[in-house]
Amino acid sequence: MDGMNIQWYPGHMTKTRRMIAQQLRHMDAVCEILDARIPIASRNPDMEELTADKPRLIVLNRVDLADPAATRRWRDYFQRRGCAVLEANAKAGQGVRQFPAAVRELLADKLAAYAQRGQAGRMVRVMILGIPNVGKSTFINQVSRRKTAKTEDRPGVTRTKQWVPVDQSLEVMDTPGMLWPKFEDPRVGFCLACTGAVRDEVMDLEELASRLIAYLGRRYPQALAERYRIQPEPEESGYDLLTRAGRKRGFVVRGGETDTERMARVLLDEFRDGRLGRFTLELPEELDHE
């Protein structure tokens, strides 16, 4: 897949990384919130090394927007690597009630050891990690049944750590969403931009939408036929597809030109909110080491 070169690393993220490293020693486990449509692209590679010695729960969030068959493959992928996996749609509350049980199952041996030492009921602490705009704060609010973590539909809202009680013996630490200094794989930049993890203001939206519609034309042509009444042709460029979709929508400006910028915004909006369908932009078998 063609990629996008994006560099975006606000200064507060350096401070966040330091804070996470300091707090990890107090944690029983780590929970990573990933976007089910882009599980690898939405996973900060720095966190793998930073949290390597901690039991890990992977939450595949936004499964309602992802290709169900692909989600099953990703679940198997992470389970093979020793992670517990929870599928969730935090916005609707799906999957969040299983979080306490999933944590305790993950830590069963540790909790049994606590009980043998007479420490049954000891507080379990879990650090919640996730890049900006992956739904982390929404997940925490659902799990804790309160409006504690600030949520907003734009990247980088949570700026400080905060403790959130889940029940009498489980609490989670919310942390600021943290990207990494440079996306070495340009495909990662493409995936993050499509899902809104990188602000649209720093993007060429027509280029992004052209690449997205080209990918959908290859992998999910039926969705384009149903939504925009276009059938992708072999070797047709993404920009050509975007132009044809725009004309079908009636986005024509004076002089007969297609308003591809408007169509780009519509495509991205409909992709992000699920009106276009359920899609996954990367698969386990596409990874280099698979």
Image: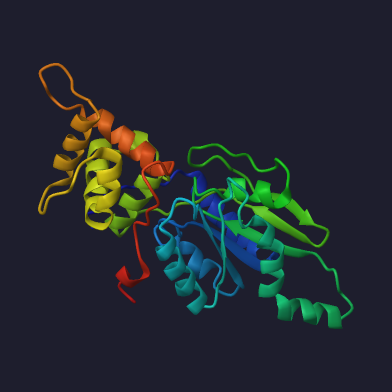
Image x and y of residue 218, in percent: 22, 56
**Residue sitting farthest toward the top:** 254
Quarter-of-image position of residue 269: top left
| Residue drawn at x 58%, y 45% as measured from the top left | 91
Image x and y of residue 62, in percent: 50, 52
Q: How is the image coloured?
A: rainbow
The quadrant of the rendering that contains the N terminus is bottom left
How many marks do you count on the picture?
A: 0
Res. 135 in view: yes
Q: Is residue 173 left or right of residue 111?
A: left
The residue closer to the viewer here, 56 or 178, is 56
Query: Relative to 154, does residue 32 appear above or below in the rendering?
Result: below
Q: Is residue 80 left or right of residue 184?
A: right
The residue closer to the viewer here, 32 or 183, is 32
The quadrant of the rendering that contains the C terminus is bottom left
Image x and y of residue 259, in percent: 20, 26
| Residue drawn at x 67%, y 46% as measured from the top left | 141
Image x and y of residue 81, in percent: 49, 77
The residue closer to the viewer here, 161 or 273, is 273
Res. 204 in view: no
Query: Relative to 109, does residue 282 appear above or below in the rendering?
Result: above
Quarter-of-image position of residue 275: top left
| Residue drawn at x 72%, y 77% as measured from the top left | 108
